[in-house]
């Protein structure tokens, strides 16, 4: 079933929108939704060079000329294909998440993922999080 993510009018060209999904294995992942002149796509929110490096660190992914710029070493991924041909992440491709635009909205159509909420994974959602404990 397609789940509504946001209105296309909320996402200008060159913008990104961060949300969290539940994966088929029960884990949570962040997804960065991007819009360029040519496409609307969604990618798991980590660099292929160092997978603990988020592309969107909670205040929007850096976008330049239709590419997503990794904030750590500056590799640039084509926002439409997810492919990187430069820098430390060269010859890699971001992990795609299926989305579509329908009637002015962006919807999640990925059968393996369930929308949880807008924004980053919350600290309380992380495995082993002790943020609810006091010491
Ligand atoms: S961590 Fe992204 S290019 Fe190195």
Image (cartoon, rainbow, N blue to C red):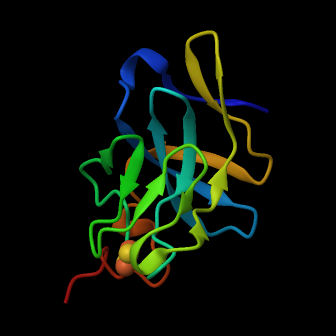
Q: Identify the image quadrant of residue 95.
A: bottom right
Residue 53 percent location from the top left of the image: 37, 75
Point out the residue furthest to the top here.
Answer: 103
Horizontal arrangement in the rendering, residue 98 relative to residue 70 (left or right): right
Residue 25 percent location from the top left of the image: 74, 70
Horizontal arrangement in the rendering, residue 106 relative to residue 118 (left or right): right
Q: Quadrant of ligand 1?
A: bottom left
Quadrant that contains the N terminus: top right
Q: Is residue 113 above or below residue 13?
A: below
Name the residue at 62% across, 69% down.
27
Q: Nearer the viewer, residue 100 or 124?
A: 100
Q: Nearer the viewer, residue 7 or 115?
A: 7
Horizontal arrangement in the rendering, residue 90 relative to residue 102 (left or right): left
Point out the residue furthest to the bottom here.
Answer: 135
Horizontal arrangement in the rendering, residue 39 relative to residue 11 (left or right): right
Name the residue at 45% across, 73% down.
126
Residue 39 percent location from the top left of the image: 56, 31
Q: Nearer the viewer, residue 65 or 25?
A: 65
Name the residue at 57% across, 40% down.
41
Q: Is residue 47 above or below residue 35?
A: below
Q: Is residue 26 above or below residue 106?
A: below
Point out the residue furthest to the left here.
Answer: 135
Residue 135 percent location from the top left of the image: 19, 90
């Amino acid at each position: 079933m397609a789940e509504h993510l946001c209105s296309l009018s909320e996402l200008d060209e060159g913008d990104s929108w961060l949300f969290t999904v539940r994966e088929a294995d029960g884990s949570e992942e962040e997804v960065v939704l991007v819009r360029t002149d040519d496409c609307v796509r969604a990618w798991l929110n980590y660099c292929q060079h160092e997978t603990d490096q988020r592309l969107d660190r909670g205040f929007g992914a850096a976008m330049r000329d239709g590419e997503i710029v990794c904030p750590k070493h500056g590799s640039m991924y084509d926002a439409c294909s997810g492919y990187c041909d430069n820098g430390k992440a060269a010859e890699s491709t971001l992990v795609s998440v299926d989305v579509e635009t329908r009637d002015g909205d962006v919807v999640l159509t990925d059968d393996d993922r369930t929308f949880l909420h807008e924004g980053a994974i919350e600290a309380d959602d992380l495995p082993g999080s002790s943020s609810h404990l006091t010491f």
